[in-house]
Image: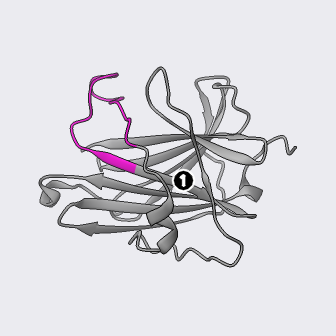
Amino acid sequence: MRTVVVFVGLVAATAVVEAVSAPTPRITATPIPEATAIKVDGELNDAIWQSVPPVKEFLQREPREGAAPTFETEARVAYDATALYVAVQAFDSDPQRIVGIRTRRDEGSPSDWISVLVDSFHDRRSAFEFDVNPAGVKQDSYWFNDTNNDQGWDAVWDVAVSRSERGWRAEFRIPFSQLRYRPS
């Protein structure tokens, strides 16, 4: 069981992704051309994902914080006028051992998870969290004052997952209307 966490902070009109490490490389999200639509199906085969540079500089959070990852992970971030898109490929050398337990929304389980945290104020004290497991179970919560969270916060967002011989994938669509931020 493993959890992949992608941190995203919104700055002005662009989105910036930060992997869990210090110092953190800053990678600007790729704007999606106006006439382009992303099909959120978990397959990551839309043409836009080929042009978005992958984020690969991840470190463990659990069980050994700061250690090198057990498995390689790639995340890509893009945006259009209405939403933030995040595509994650979680590689696994033994995909038969990927755990995805089907539960109700916002119910925890001993599954593998991919989490996207959006630090829209870039204050490193608050974040909107969006999670999914390989069974497609969604969780979301709002973090504030460093360690407090509101698990009753239920945003309207989309995610799709898929599995392959290389691991599993998740594709997120997070509408900007579900986030709070200072527009500029």
Work out whether residue 124 or residue 105 is closer to the camera in this orientation and state it.
124
| x and y, in percent, of residue 137 in the image | 42, 61
> Which corner quadrant holds the C terminus?
top right
Residue sitting at 26 percent across and 34 percent down? 69
Secondary structure category for the residue under label 1: strand
Tag 1: amino acid: Val
Residue shown at 38%/35% (left/top)?
Answer: 57
* Residue 62 is one of the magenta-drawn residues: yes
| Quadrant (top left, top right, bottom left, bottom right) of the N terminus | top left
Residue in the picture at 13% in, 52% down: 93
Q: Can you give x and y, in whole percent of width and height, for residue 58 in the image?
A: 37, 35
| Majority SS type along the magenta span | loop
Visible in this render: residue 159?
A: yes
**Outermost residue to the right:** 184
Kindly identify the residue that appears in the image at 26 percent across and 28 percent down.
Answer: 68
Is residue 32 located in the magenta-colored stretch of the structure?
no
Give the quadrant of residue 177.
bottom right
Above or below, comparing residue 101 to residue 22 in the picture? below
Label 1: few (<14), some (14–19) or many (≥20) C-alpha neighbours in 10 Å: many
Q: What is the magenta range? A: 56-74
Relative to residue 67, is residue 156 depicted above or below? Answer: below
Quadrant assignment, res 97: bottom left
- Left or right of 141? Residue 66 is left
Across and down, in percent, residue 37 comes to 61, 77
